[in-house]
Amino acid sequence: MFSHFDKIFFEGIRAGMSNQSPQVKAFQDQIRSQLPSCNSIVEATDRIRASLEAIIGGALADDQLQALEEAKRLVAEGLKPIEELQKHSILEPHPKWYMGSGAHSKNWFALRTYIADTKGWGEDTAEKINQSSDEVVSLLADPRNEKFQYRGLVVGYVQSGKTANMTAVIAKAIDEGYNMVVVLAGLTNKLRQQTQRRMEADLVARYPIDWFKWTSSDDDGDFKIPANQSFANPGSGLVQLCVLKKNVSPLNHFIKTLERTPPAALRQLKVLLIDDECDSASVNAASRELDMTAINERIRVIIKKLPAVTYVGYTATPFANVLINPYPDLGENLDDLYPRNFITALERPDGYFGAEQLFGRDPIDADDVQPDEEGLDMIRTVPDDDLPFLQPPSRAEKDAFHPQMTPSLEDSVLYFIASCAARLSRGHTGKHMTMLVHTSVYMILHDRVSALIEGWLDLNAEDLSTASGDIGVRLRDVWESESGRLPASITPEHPVPFEELQPYIETVLRKVETPVENGFSENRIDYESGAKIYIVVGGTVLARGLTLEGLMVSYFLRTTSQYDTLLQMGRWFGYRHGYEDLPRIWMTTELKRSFRNLAAVEAEIRADIREFTHRDVTPMAFAVRIRSVPGMAITAANKMRHAQVCDISYSGQHVQTIRFDHKSTDVIDGNWSAATELLSSAHNLKTAHATDQRLLYTNLPVSLIRRFLQTYSVHESHRELSANLLLKYIDEMSEQLKFWNVGFFQPRGGVESEKSLGMVGSVGMNNRAMIDDDRADVADIKALMSKRDVLFDCAKQVQSEKSDDWAALKRKRQEVTGPVPLLLLYAIDRNSEPKRGYKTRTDLEAAGDLIGFGIVFPGSEEGAGGYVSVRLEAPSGDELESLDEEVDARQEAGDAV
């Protein structure tokens, strides 16, 4: 009845455990493992007690009985039905069928124990995975139904452990009655094998006899038509597993096997189809409405041929998925993969290192930015002067181009060597350590860069090992310059001096390898054969799904103008337990700016989903909006055929100037004059409500606002704040925006301006240091407004409210003021300096004191701003007739889909 593990467990209990928590935890695991074969928790508990007493030859001690009773209570508590599961989802309502795991949930119980104990992730992490996967499972179709076709989307974070949620969802789904799991796992054998191994380790290995695997982790282990030409009638309790590469051949084999499966067997299959990285290859990228790319078409055919299937796409970059046509093509009636049944966003896991940690977030108080709002000082700039030595001038010249070691590449390699030594000094022997070098898409250059780095290391090995010569001095200088640059919360209590690293450097140099990972190389990464120290040179394969274990340093020059491609290239996102202070990234100023913009876009998408989970809106009625960034494309153009630009409204938005022409005296003087004219005119028309920090004029005519916006010069990168767009919207909403409130914010203790603002006089100025991104022509201050400024024109008791949710604050303001727009002015000290210790900022050094403005527009945010979203209206009768004619014409020509 009990396994060898159980006997070891009993012996541990008999010996007596000094700490009761592990004892209770062990009892909980045993109760859960026994539950599926028992009628109740009481029966499972009694069985464990009887077996244990039989082994020890007597009654359990009182403390052991108490631990067993506590374990029983905790298990029972965890099995109570959960009333509210769908807290982070936009969904098509359907009957509630799943209320959390139950006594029958043997696969989940086994996986939970494996996660918490064998993997060592701990009970807290296991519980969070439990909660997030419960929500996803509740959104699936009920497998007890004979027929269903559901489509959903799970939005995670790049390198955030989406697979852990995925495996938990699979375990719970098969506990509930799904009997076939199909995982679409990347475009390469490497990714498919990686996923296959994960499925086998996390799921199959728990109860091997309950699984039938149609695929394996062998090089040729992808799906093939079986000998009997069809899928078998699922036996009771047997689960079939297929892990397929997103490639035409295995997908065709799968379709042919479905077609040859007897209808009676097909009707018995309850299929959970998981599409990992579902924005890659799965989305239809054909150029015409009635065309389909090969992989997209085959996935759609598979779904159509299965009577009972739930399709769940997982991605961290859903830009293409939410722009899919939600209506079926008329020719073949193949629904596309739009997530019409649900869209859910996973919460950011604790300890996750992502875009927000690197680039920060909007501060609650822009005058007192906190370290966790600012972003970490981990990005180093690759000078433009280095690029000609690392990238060929053109594609035609790539074969003749030979890269060179540049100072920035040398610094990054030196820092990686020192970081590996630091980890070894911390006892991280047996752990993987990796550096990524991604300079070009051309495979011929991957081999050359790898050889270049390997040769440079060999040439300098002796001086690096002994810290002698110029290169040894640089190694020390690089390490010391990088020490102490991060907040104390993630920095070791005592920085590691270079002298403590030096004994480990020879070991690092002896173990370091320079593999190439581009899908075709032979010298590839292999984390299965012991701890590795890698400097991995690679291409596109590194930008999608492939995990680089122990990644600490990235040297990244690859450029792309697409949101999804760029974010997926962020292989540095993830978890860095025990070395949170060590990651560094070398990239160009332009790439840094693009990533910062995309961090804001990504946060907005999640905020959109979060905001609409509380409303009665379905995925077919709510289009996820994606902000457009000048100079960038959201995804490939052929994936955006159903997108529509909806920058038609500022309703419910707040906008603010954060980038300035800070060296142009003409612009600076002109903007100061514009603010002077506005405030002087307001002063002549209205009596100001004044406090020590605030100057407020209420119910001013819109004509004053129009004149200010016409004369104020906005930096060219602020497309959404251009006078043309703002004035067009104000004119279109002239009845609602007739009267405005205008405020001027002065911080306590701010430096007094030398110039006056007309009749207002000299004013207190704000300190806003600029982001240090090596661009001389623009000052990016990241944030002008504090979140509390949204309540500027509200009563004092309302102003004291604290929240980190812009939308909630704007709703609160509108409750108090009604639908009145608010224009806020800020004077910025030309000599603004960073707060002490904020190394991501630098002195503003403007040619004069600046004027910035923010506007809070009344109304709802839905449909507002410069965004792109999918068109969700069903086709009209005329459109349907036109498409029918096209189908007929193409069929006659023999060119139908």
Image (spheres, grey):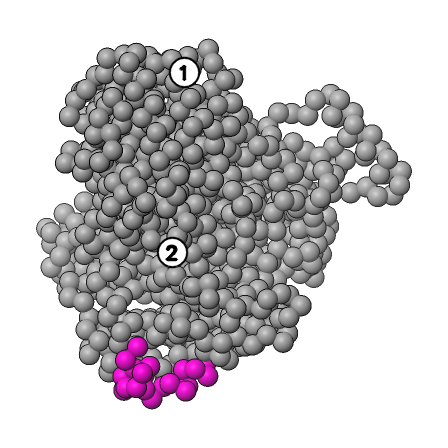
In which quadrant will I find the C terminus? top right
Pick whichever, 650 or 510, lies toward us: 650
**Residue annotated with mark 2:** 774
> Relative to 168, is 246 on the left or the right?
right
**Residue annotated with mark 1:** 702
Report the residue at 46% width, 54% height from top. Answer: 590
- Relative height, residue 519 to residue 655 (above, below): below
Residue stretch rendered in magenta on the structure: 454-474
- Relative height, residue 817 to residue 423 (above, below): above
Q: Amino acid at mark 2?
A: Asp
> Relative to 427, is 553 on the left or the right?
right
Give the SS element for disc 1: helix
> Relative to 657, is 139 on the left or the right?
right
Quote the CA–CA distance across marks 1 and 2: 39 Å
Q: Residues within 10 Å of mark 1 (few under 14, many from 20)?
A: some
Is 625 colored magenta in this rendering?
Answer: no
